[in-house]
Image (cartoon, helix red, strand yellow):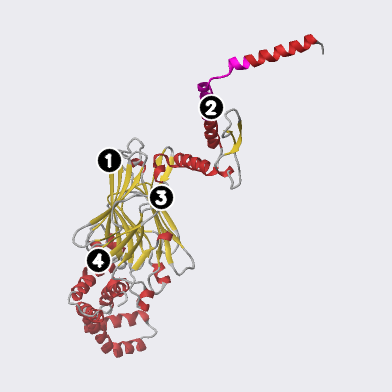
């Protein structure tokens, strides 16, 4: 290399050094560049998190992203995103997509609360704000009665029942069973002198918008009042799409499950009509065809009944009974999906009532809505005889505090006295027929080959003696409804259960 080449290279190097010195960024410019790179890296990480689905994230996965290395302001390299943080971002986004404004209530802890009075004890779960199970006091299931256990009779348990309200939101069906409600009520409340209530709130991202489930219990009552309250959700059209989803596998409580099954079904009553019911022997389903006053999940001696003063709309409502086959724990599966929608407004309240109690004719008759008809007193005239004769007499005798064995004896005697005139006519006619029997036998023997003449002479003998051959049959036919009604009453009387 000659001298001129060396001088040229030195001059070029000098120029580069001088250029770097005069064009180097200031300290303020370096900080600005660093901040810009940080913001770009965070934005890229957030964008990556949105694109990655939860199904693609595994325990040992690493997700590359550009990260500014600590201590090196000029370098960007690949690192792994904190998976817990990413999962949290994805889960939060999924919740918002799935539940909308209610996503804030999608996580929490379910806690139990109770309301009880002298007759029933109701246990609630804050998850879903639902009725978890109901116990009826002063009654026991058969096995507890035999074993001498003091536990209350339970109609259904939490694991095999459902109670939720569903509605449409952003073209999706939302069910309250997925949310955790809050409440300021005490964990345990005992109703004595006045009604007490418990209110569960389903919150949204807006404190003014919420759904309340309000339950109240009166002293000495089998009725649990229930109201669904919608606040400031008119814009979301929540109230108009409300549906109550109620289901339970009713627990077997009696000695013989097969006998329970034979009289267990879903009963219901349309407005202005008599009660009806689904099949008691097979699985059955029905789309309701008119406004319905009440729906009863009935077994032998106890029922769970849902009532509405204004009636349940038939649009989209259905009821179902499902047989369960061989199981000793449950009787049948009862299902009701009921339209409880209302006009959208700033604040909407949908009142209902639950009855959890015995199939006591007088207890159910207090509601004056035909619910007492679920008690199996027999059809037609047999039911009328029980309603207006047997039950009033039974209740009258019960009022004296007598033993039920004595009450049954006295009831039988009273019934016999009432039908005594008919019985007397029957006996009198039978006695006359016995007196005339030798004469009738003689006519039959003498005119054995002349049927027509034989019949004429026998009838002439009856007329002469003042005997009507049908007189003994008619009183018997009149007595039969009374006797069958009494026979039908005893197995249905809750008062005689375990007595």
Secondary element type, mark 1: strand
Q: In this view, does 255 lie above or below 64?
A: below
Read off the magenta span. 19-38
Q: Residue 108 carries which label?
A: 3
Q: Which residue is drawn at 82% across and 13% down?
A: 1
Q: Which of marks 2 and 1 is nearer the N terminus?
A: 2
Q: Which of marks 2 and 3 is nearer the N terminus?
A: 2
Q: Earlier in the sequence, mark 3 or mark 4?
A: 3
CB atoms at circles 2 and 1 under 8 Å apart? no
Secondary element type, mark 3: loop
Q: Earlier in the sequence, mark 3 or mark 1?
A: 3
Q: Which mark is residue 140?
A: none
Question: Which tag is nearer the camera, tag 3 or tag 1?
Answer: 3
Secondary element type, mark 4: loop
Q: Is residue 58 left or right of residue 259?
A: right
Quadrant housing residue 15: top right
Measured as percent of width and height from the top left, residue 116 is found at 27, 62
Dot 4 alpha-carbon crowd within 10 angstroms: few under 14, some 14 to 19, many 20 or more: some
Q: How far apart are marks 3 and 1 (CA)?
A: 26 Å
Q: Earlier in the sequence, mark 2 or mark 4?
A: 2
Give the residue number, with chain letter if any, for mark 1: 347
Question: Which tag is nearer the camera, tag 2 or tag 3?
Answer: 2
Dot 1 alpha-carbon crowd within 10 angstroms: few under 14, some 14 to 19, many 20 or more: some
Dot 2 alpha-carbon crowd within 10 angstroms: few under 14, some 14 to 19, many 20 or more: some
Give the residue number, with chain letter if any, for mark 4: 118
- The residue lying furthest to the top in this view is 4
Q: Earlier in the sequence, mark 4 or mark 1?
A: 4
């Amino acid at each position: 290399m000659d001298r001129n080449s060396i001088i040229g290279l030195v001059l070029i190097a000098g120029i580069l050094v001088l250029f770097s010195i005069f064009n180097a960024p200031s300290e303020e410019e370096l900080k600005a560049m660093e901040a810009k790179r940080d913001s770009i890296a965070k934005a890229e990480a957030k964008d990556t998190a949105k694109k990655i689905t939860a199904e693609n994230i595994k325990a040992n996965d690493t997700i590359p992203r550009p990260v500014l290395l600590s201590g090196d302001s000029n370098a960007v390299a690949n690192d792994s995103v904190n998976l817990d943080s990413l999962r949290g971002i994805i889960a939060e986004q999924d919740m918002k997509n799935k539940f909308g404004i209610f996503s804030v209530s999608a996580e929490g802890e379910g806690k139990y609360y109770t309301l009880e009075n002298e007759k029933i004890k109701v246990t609630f779960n804050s998850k879903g704000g639902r009725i978890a199970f109901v116990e009826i006091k002063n009654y026991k299931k058969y096995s507890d009665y035999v074993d001498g256990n003091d536990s209350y009779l339970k109609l259904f348990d939490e694991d095999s029942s459902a109670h939720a309200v569903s509605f449409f939101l952003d073209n999706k069906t939302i069910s309250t069973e997925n949310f955790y409600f809050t409440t300021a009520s005490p964990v345990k409340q005992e109703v004595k002198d006045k009604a007490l209530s418990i209110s569960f709130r389903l919150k949204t991202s807006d404190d003014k918008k919420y759904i309340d489930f309000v339950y109240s219990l009166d002293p000495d009552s089998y009725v649990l009042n229930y109201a669904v309250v919608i606040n400031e959700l008119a814009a979301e059209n929540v109230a108009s799409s409300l549906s109550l989803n109620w289901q339970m596998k009713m627990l077997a409580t009696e000695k013989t499950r097969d006998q329970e099954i034979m009289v267990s079904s879903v009963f219901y009553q349309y407005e202005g009509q008599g009660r009806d019911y689904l099949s008691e022997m097979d699985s059955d389903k029905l789309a309701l065809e008119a406004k319905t006053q009440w729906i009863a999940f009935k077994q032998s001696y106890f029922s769970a009944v849902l009532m509405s003063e204004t009636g349940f709309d038939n649009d989209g409502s259905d009821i179902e009974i499902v047989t369960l086959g061989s199981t000793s724990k449950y009787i049948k599966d009862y299902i009701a999906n009921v339209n409880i929608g209302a006009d959208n407004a700033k604040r909407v309240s949908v009142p209902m009532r639950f009855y959890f109690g015995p199939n006591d004719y007088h207890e159910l008759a207090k509601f004056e809505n035909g619910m007492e008809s679920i008690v199996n007193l027999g059809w037609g005239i047999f039911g009328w005889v029980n309603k207006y004769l047997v039950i009033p007499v039974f209740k009258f005798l019960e009022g004296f505090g007598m033993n039920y064995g004595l009450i049954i004896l006295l009831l039988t005697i009273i019934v016999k006295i009432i039908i005594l005139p008919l019985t007397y006519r029957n006996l009198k006619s039978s006695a006359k027929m016995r007196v005339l029997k030798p004469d009738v036998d003689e006519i039959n023997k003498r005119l054995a080959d002349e049927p027509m003449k034989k019949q004429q002479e026998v009838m002439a003998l009856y007329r002469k003696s003042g005997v009507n051959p049908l007189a003994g049959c008619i009183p018997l036919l009149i007595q039969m409804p009374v006797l069958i009604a009494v026979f039908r009453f005893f197995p249905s009387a809750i008062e005689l259960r375990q007595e």
